[in-house]
Each structure stands twice: as C-alpha cells, then as structure tokens.
Image: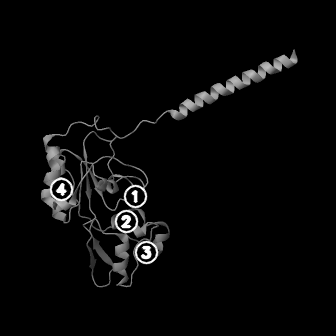
C-alpha cells in the first residue's frame, strides 16, 4: 500500500511539473507590446506636415534633409543605448539663421522636435519617442554648427556652437597649452561640448578647475506659438 501511495505521489509530482513547464513555455512565447506605432496606427499627416520636408530642403538644401523612413536616418533616430522612434525628417542646419528657420517651420507645421547634438547620450533624450506624442517628429541635428572660437589669446574662454565636439575642442585648446574640461570614455565619438559641460564637469574632472556655461544663445517657443 505504501509503495502504491509512493507511485501516486511521484505521478502527481510529474504531472504538476509538466503543467508548470507548459505554463512557463506559454509565458515565454508571449510577445511584449511594441511601443512603436505601426504605420496604420499613426495619425494622418496634415497638409502642413506633409509639405514640411520640402520646406526644410528649401531652407538648408536637399543634401541636409534626410527622409525619416530611409536607412540613413537610423543613426539619428536610435539612441546609443536606449530610445528609438520614427521621424518625418532629419534636418541638419548649417548656420544659426538656418537653425532658427527650421524650428519656426517645425512649429508652424505642428510637429514634435528633437534637438540633437552628437546623439552619444545614454538616456535616449535626443531621439524621437513615438509613445510620448501622436504628432510626427522632426530631428534637428546641430552637428554642422561646429564652430569653436577662442575668446582672448590665452584660451581661458571659448565660444562653442551647438555642434562643436569635446574632442575637437581638446585639440584646439592644446594650441593654447590648455586641456579640455572633460575626458569622457566616449570622447572619440566627439560628444557635444554643451553635453560635456552639463554631464562631465564634476568628479575627477574638477581637478582641472571649474567649467561652466557663462552665456548661452538659444531659441524657445513662446506661449503664443512663435519662436524667439
């Protein structure tokens, strides 16, 4: 009787184990929901949004506007570690005037804007996020705005445009016998100077002395929907 009872217990344990295995197998096959909208889920473009890529081309030149659906856009729409989304277009202004004009065109068309430097950040903050808005995105990449202008002969201060990189800055400051403010692990990617000041100026970098942004020229969207 005891032996028969043992057999029943073993059989029950095997059956329970099999059922648990089947349940776990079914769970493994479940697919997580895709945060990116499918083509049919995205709202239809307005006339102004559909015309925006051509308008941006007229502002900065055809060679500096990338179709968001092309493979060339991937480096601008996918973050270095996390974050990705779809963009209607990627525009690369070459002057401050062009950058302001591009922002004005985007605001007028009612699209979401992702300002972008070198896209080397680890938080995905400079790439489109489809889950954050139903509006189409436009990436304004500032990399062509790469001027670095030393202020004074000693190189104690420099004027850096939005697309200037910290690796390039280090080489320029070397001519003045000075070091760059930060030496990040990703310095070979030439992250933007603004990002370096914001995120790479503390800790061990303080041995070189404080670094900060004294003055900044920027655009903003007003409550009335204009750009200033």
Element at label 1: loop
Residue tagged 4: 102
The Cα–Cα distance between marks 4 and 1, rounded to whole angstroms, is 23 Å
| Residue 103, position as x, y percentages in the image | 19, 54
Q: Residues within 10 Å of mark 1 (few under 14, many from 20)?
A: many
Question: What residue do we see at 35% from left, 41% from top?
Answer: 36
Give x and y (percent) for residue 127. 33, 52
Residues at discs 2 and 1 in contact (Cβ within 8 Å): yes
- On the rendered image, what quadrant is the C terminus found in? bottom left
User: Circle 4 — which element?
Assistant: helix
Gap between marks 2 and 1 measured at Cα: 8 Å
The reply to whether discs 4 and 3 touch (Cβ–Cβ < 8 Å) is no
In this rendering, the answer to whether 3 lies above or below 118 is: above
Q: What is the number of the mark on residue 198?
A: none
Label 2, on which residue?
191
Q: Tell me if label 3 and label 2 are in contact, CB under 8 Å.
A: no
Which residue is label 1 attached to? 121
Residue pictured at 34% horizontal, 57% vertical: 75
Q: Residue 178 sits in which quadrant?
A: bottom left
Few, some or many residues within 10 Å of mark 2 (<14, 14–19, 20+): many
Q: Residue at label 3?
A: 209
């Amino acid at each position: 009787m005891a032996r028969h009872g043992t057999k029943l217990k073993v059989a029950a344990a095997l059956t329970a184990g099999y059922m648990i295995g089947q349940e776990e197998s079914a769970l493994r096959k479940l697919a997580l929901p895709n945060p990116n909208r499918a083509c049919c889920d995205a709202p239809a473009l307005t006339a102004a949004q559909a015309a925006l890529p051509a308008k941006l081309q007229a502002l900065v030149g055809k060679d500096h506007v990338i179709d968001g659906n092309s493979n060339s856009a991937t480096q601008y729409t996918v973050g270095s570690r996390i974050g990705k989304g779809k963009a209607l277009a990627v525009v690369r202004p070459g002057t401050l005037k062009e950058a302001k004009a591009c922002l004005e065109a985007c605001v007028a068309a009612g699209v979401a804007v992702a300002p972008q430097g070198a896209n080397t950040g680890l938080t995905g903050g400079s790439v489109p996020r489809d889950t954050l808005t139903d509006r189409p995105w436009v990436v304004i990449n500032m990399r062509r705005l790469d001027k670095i202008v030393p202020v004074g002969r000693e190189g104690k201060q420099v004027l850096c445009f939005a697309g200037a990189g910290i690796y390039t800055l280090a080489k320029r400051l070397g001519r003045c016998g000075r070091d760059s403010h930060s030496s990040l692990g990703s310095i070979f990617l030439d992250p933007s100077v603004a990002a370096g000041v914001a995120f790479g100026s503390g800790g061990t970098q303080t041995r070189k002395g404080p670094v900060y942004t004294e003055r900044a020229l920027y655009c903003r969207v007003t409550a009335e929907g204009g750009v200033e």
